Structures are given as structure tokens and as C-alpha cells.
Amino acid sequence: MAENEGDAVDAYGFGRSKIREMIKEIRPAAPPDVPRDMAVVDAAAESAGFVSREATFGSEGLGYRPLRVQRVEPRIPLNMRVPISIGEAFQRFCEENRYSYPEGLAEVMRRAGLPLR
């Protein structure tokens, strides 16, 4: 039986040696020609209904928003449960003034005359 093991037939009628030969004949397909011009790619995407998620800058775009400078200073976690009205007012204050929450807290403290150090 050991001699015929290589020629054993599976449930679908394929012998093991035939499967090996079929696998050896598999060749990768040639890659498609990739357009180098992004205008061609964008036009094809637009015609297929895709919308660009890339940020646009300028008068009709979102506008440039520089990255915030991270201060090199140790940080502590600060978690509070505040009434919804206060939390929403603080979030709105930060959003309207483009502050992160730590920056917003620092600004509120500055306006209240509290020392930051």
C-alpha cells in the first residue's frame, strides 16, 4: 500500500500526483497596468461614485489646521463627572476657540486669575 500512496484517489477522483502537477502549473497573472497619472485614477474613482477623503486646502477646502504643539511636561489623568449643561458648555467653548481640553482648562483658569504653576 505504501507504493500506491502517492497515486491514491481522493473523493473527487483526483490522484495526489495529479494534484501536485496541477499546482505546479499555476502561474501568477501579470499585474494590471497601473496608471501613473493620478488625474486618471481620480476620474475613474469619481465615475464609479467614490468620493475623495483627502483634505483639500484653500478657499473651497477645509483650511489648514496646524498641529498643536505638545508640551514636554508630566501629565496626570483628570476625570470629572459634571452636569451635562456644564460639560456641553465647556466642550462648545473648546470647539469654538479651537482648544484641546487641557488648553481650554488652562484658558478658563487664566481668565479666572488662577495661577497655572
Image (spheres, grey):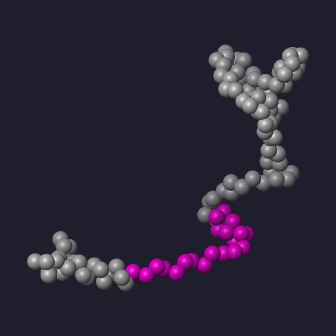
**Does residue 19 appear in this view?**
yes
Residue 9 vertical placement versus 45 (above, below): below
Q: Quick check: is 43 in the magenta stretch?
A: yes
In the rendered image, which quarter contains the C terminus? Answer: top right
Decide which of 26, 77 is in the foreground and name it: 77
Q: Quadrant of residue 52?
A: bottom right
Q: Quadrant of residue 96?
A: top right
Which residues are the magenta region?
26-46
Decide which of 77, 9 is in the foreground and name it: 77
Decide which of 51, 98 is in the foreground and name it: 98
Residue 89 vertical placement versus 16 (above, below): above
Residue 2 vertical placement versus 77 (above, below): below
Q: Quadrant of residue 66?
A: top right
In the rendered image, which quarter contains the N terminus? Answer: bottom left
User: Which residue is painted at 82% across and 53% down in the image?
Assistant: 57
- State the image coordinates of residue 106 (x, y, percent, origin top left): 82, 25
Q: Quick check: is 97 in the magenta stretch?
A: no
User: Which residue is painted at 86% across and 18% down in the image?
Assistant: 115
Q: Is residue 27 left or right of residue 46?
A: left
- State the image coordinates of residue 43 (x, y, percent, origin top left): 69, 67
Q: How many marks?
A: 0
- State the image coordinates of residue 67 (x, y, percent, origin top left): 79, 44
User: Which residue is painted at 73% across and 27% down in the image?
Assistant: 91
**Does residue 94 appear in this view?**
no
Decide which of 2, 15 is in the foreground and name it: 2
- State the image coordinates of residue 93 (x, y, percent, origin top left): 79, 26
User: Which residue is painted at 86% across and 16% down in the image?
Assistant: 114
